[in-house]
């Protein structure tokens, strides 16, 4: 032991003797100075960490900047919150209904633009809402032929390129209507979307439905931390009207999902066009353990109106 360490040990011993801290005295006698100091650090660290866990039990914002990224720490539900189902999507849309504008409609680029104004959000809900809702309901009805969510099952939802959260909202509307499921068992909803204004809107619609994790990014910037999930929960991954768009690297996205997800995973992929893109995405999971294609649709269905629909529902793991 160096002279410095000896002097330090002696000082600590004297101090413990003076203040009568018997336990510390014994610790100092039986340990090297450095490890004792480490244990002091440990002791002061843990209560603070616990406090942070509780404070952070609220939606976490993420941006591309590394500093903010650190904030995307996943925490378990530590507070008892009364979760409630979101409003029915039809009612949400009615509230946001406003006059039609050609200019705003054109700026949506057939629903593919990254929205940046409130007018665009309203116009999107108004123009595309009913079509997307009908197709999602059809897809979830098919999903529930294979997935029986019982009252106490733990689930987690991922809504990729969520926009205003239509995918997750309609799923929860369906669960509320058709299943007897306790929302306390919904362990989280991860909303991924590059448009900040759309993401904020999704968060407000889904507020208090579950613990929300928001990731304000394009897919190509996703990190493993963004997609963390609970091993014991059934994960439902929603891809509504995104896989047909050529705006991201599909290999990278599949890699990120494969690296982060374990246990049972269901994928619901719905679009109006480009079935080959949906197939390409699904085929990349074919080699994975437990892969099973549950349903594949390339056509349309009618429900008062004729809707073009491409859809793949598949399962991985389990
Ligand atoms: C057709 S909208 C679908 C929105 C929502 N899922 C729905 O069904 O209504 C496409 C969404 O993809 C988002 N997006 C555009 N480029 C993206 C990218 N590179 N990575 C992830 N999302 C992107 C847009 O901001 C938009 O919200």
Image (spheres, helix red, strand yellow):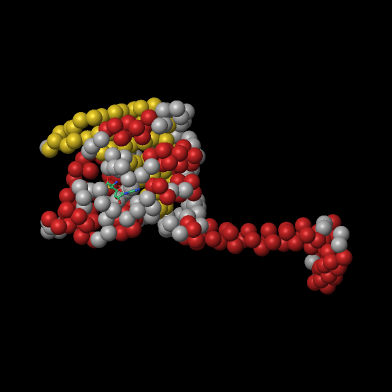
Determine whether 255 is above or below 90 in the image: above
Place residue 302 in its image quadrant. top left
- Which part of the image, by quadrant, shows the N terminus? bottom right
Say if residue 272 shows up in the picture: yes
Say if residue 153 shows up in the picture: no
Drawn side of residue 208 relative to residue 133, left or right: right
What is the count of numbered marks? 0
Residue 269 or 114: which is nearer the viewer?
114
Place residue 309 in its image quadrant. top left
Task: Name the residue at 20% across, 60% down.
Answer: 119
Q: Position of residue 155 (x, y in %)?
A: 42, 41
Q: Position of residue 30 (x, y in %)?
A: 84, 56
Q: Position of residue 286 (x, y in %)?
A: 41, 28
View extreme (bottom): residue? 18
Residue 168 or 128: which is nearer the viewer?
128
Q: Position of residue 138 (x, y in %)?
A: 24, 35
Task: Name the residue at 32% across, 31% down.
Answer: 279
Drawn side of residue 146 relative to residue 187, left or right: left
Drawn side of residue 198 relative to residue 261, left or right: left
Determine whether 235 is above or below 70 in the image: above
Task: Name the residue at 23% across, 37% down.
Answer: 273
Drawn side of residue 63 relative to residue 144, left or right: right
Residue 107 or 205: which is nearer the viewer?
107
Residue 151 or 126: which is nearer the viewer?
126
Task: Name the residue at 50% across, 61% down.
Answer: 67
């Amino acid at each position: 032991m160096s002279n410095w360490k000896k002097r330090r040990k002696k000082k600590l011993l004297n101090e413990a003797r003076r203040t009568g801290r018997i336990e510390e005295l014994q610790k100092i006698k039986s340990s090297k100075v450095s490890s004792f100091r480490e244990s002091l650090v440990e002791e002061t660290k843990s209560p603070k960490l616990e406090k942070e866990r509780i404070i952070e039990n609220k939606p976490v914002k993420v941006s591309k900047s590394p500093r903010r990224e650190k904030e995307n720490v996943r925490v378990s539900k530590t507070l008892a919150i009364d979760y409630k189902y979101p409003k029915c999507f039809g009612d949400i849309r009615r509230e946001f209904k406003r006059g039609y504008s050609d200019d705003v409609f054109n700026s949506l680029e057939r629903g593919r633009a990254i929205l940046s104004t409130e007018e665009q959000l309203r116009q999107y809900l108004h123009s595309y809402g009913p079509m997307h809702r009908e197709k999602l309901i059809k897809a979830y009805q098919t999903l529930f032929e294979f997935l029986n969510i019982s009252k106490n099952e733990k689930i987690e939802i991922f809504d990729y390129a969520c926009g205003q959260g239509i995918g997750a909202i309609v799923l929860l509307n369906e669960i509320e209507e058709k299943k007897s499921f306790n929302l306390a068992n919904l362990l989280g909803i991860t909303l991924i979307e590059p448009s900040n204004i759309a993401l904020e809107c999704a968060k407000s619609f889904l507020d208090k439905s579950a613990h929300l994790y928001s990731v304000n990014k394009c897919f190509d910037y996703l990190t493993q931390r963004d997609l963390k999930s609970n091993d014991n929960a059934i994960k439902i991954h929603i891809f509504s009207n995104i896989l047909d768009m050529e705006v991201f690297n599909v290999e990278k996205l599949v890699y990120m999902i494969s690296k982060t997800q374990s246990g049972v995973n269901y994928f619901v992929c719905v679009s109006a066009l480009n079935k080959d893109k949906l197939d390409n995405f699904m085929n990349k999971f074919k080699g994975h353990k437990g892969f099973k294609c549950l349903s594949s649709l390339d056509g349309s269905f009618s429900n008062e109106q004729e809707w073009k629909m491409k859809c793949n529902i598949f399962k991985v793991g389990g």
